[in-house]
Image (cartoon, rainbow, N blue to C red):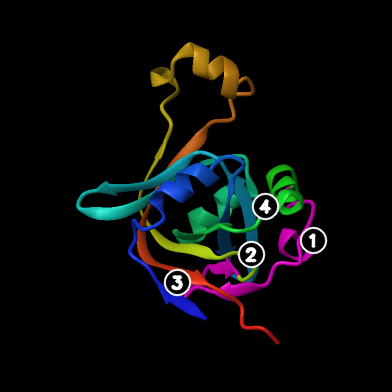
Amino acid sequence: MYKEINVFDYANIVLEKMTPGVFLNTKKNDTINTMIIGWGGINVIWGRPIFIVLVRDSRATYDLIEHSNEFTVSVPIDKQMKREIEICGTKSLRDMDKFKECNFTPIKGRKIETPIIAEIELHYECKVIYKQRLDQSMIPQIVKDRYYKNKDYHTVYYGEIVDQYIYKKEQD
């Protein structure tokens, strides 16, 4: 069951949930993946609602977004999901199917092909309208020393939010 929401109704909750993390979902052909993001958020850029996410170029998720130019973000509102956040924040698609490991049910987005996670309540469907690899020369040394010791930099994706809603699985 879907409940329509305004794109900014839950923006503060999204920001609060960035720690411990929210689920970034991607798809390439028949391959789906989810990972945890703790950086990003909802903004207005070019008069459009945008969900900004950062993905390291070394991640499997990077290849999936590069291929599809879309992603979904699933935000647990009422559930802790500590185990699932731990798995999706530390394991790679290269090592396991995280949807299967976490008993997540993928449901195709309403406006894009990338799935949402049925067991999570809040969802944003996004189409990439701009991306930019971080310019290493512009990052302060203190940030490089803390987050980029291995020179594993991020690409920043600007996803126009094309749909947003609360989803609740119907009880069997």
Marked residue nearer the N-terminal end (3 or 4): 4
Residue at the spot of label 3: 112
Marker disc for residue 101: 1
Quarter of the image with the C terminus is: bottom right
Amino acid at the residue labelled 1? Glu
Please tell me whether mark 2 sits on a helix, a strand or a loop: strand
Q: Which residue is mark 4?
A: 80
Query: In what element is the residue under mark 4?
Result: loop
Residue under numbered circle 2: 32
Look at discs 1 and 2 and give the one toward the viewer. 1
Q: Determine whether 124 is above or below 93 in the image.
A: below
Task: Give x and y (percent) for residue 159.
Answer: 38, 54
Question: Image point 51% across, 12% down: which residue?
Answer: 142
Residue 171 shown left or right of residue 74 in the figure: right
Q: Which mark is residue 27?
A: none
Does the residue at mark 3 contact the one at mark 2 (Cβ under 8 Å)? no
Q: Is residue 162 left or right of residue 18?
A: left
> How far is the residue under mark 4 from the one under mark 1?
17 Å
Residue 139 is left or right of residue 38, and the answer is: left
- Tell me which residue sits at (65%, 68%) in the image: 119
Q: Residues within 10 Å of mark 2 (few under 14, many from 20)?
A: some
Residue span colored magenta: 92-117
Residue at point 64% right, 59% down?
33
Q: Residues within 10 Å of mark 4 (few under 14, many from 20)?
A: few
Q: Are marks 4 and 2 in contact (CB under 8 Å)?
A: no
Earlier along the polypeptide chain: callout 1 or callout 2? 2
Q: Amino acid at mark 4?
A: Gln
Q: 110 left or right of 145?
A: left
| Cα gap from disc 3 to disc 4, whole angstroms | 27 Å
**Does the magenta segment cover residue 93?**
yes
Q: Residue placed farthest to the bottom in the image?
A: 172
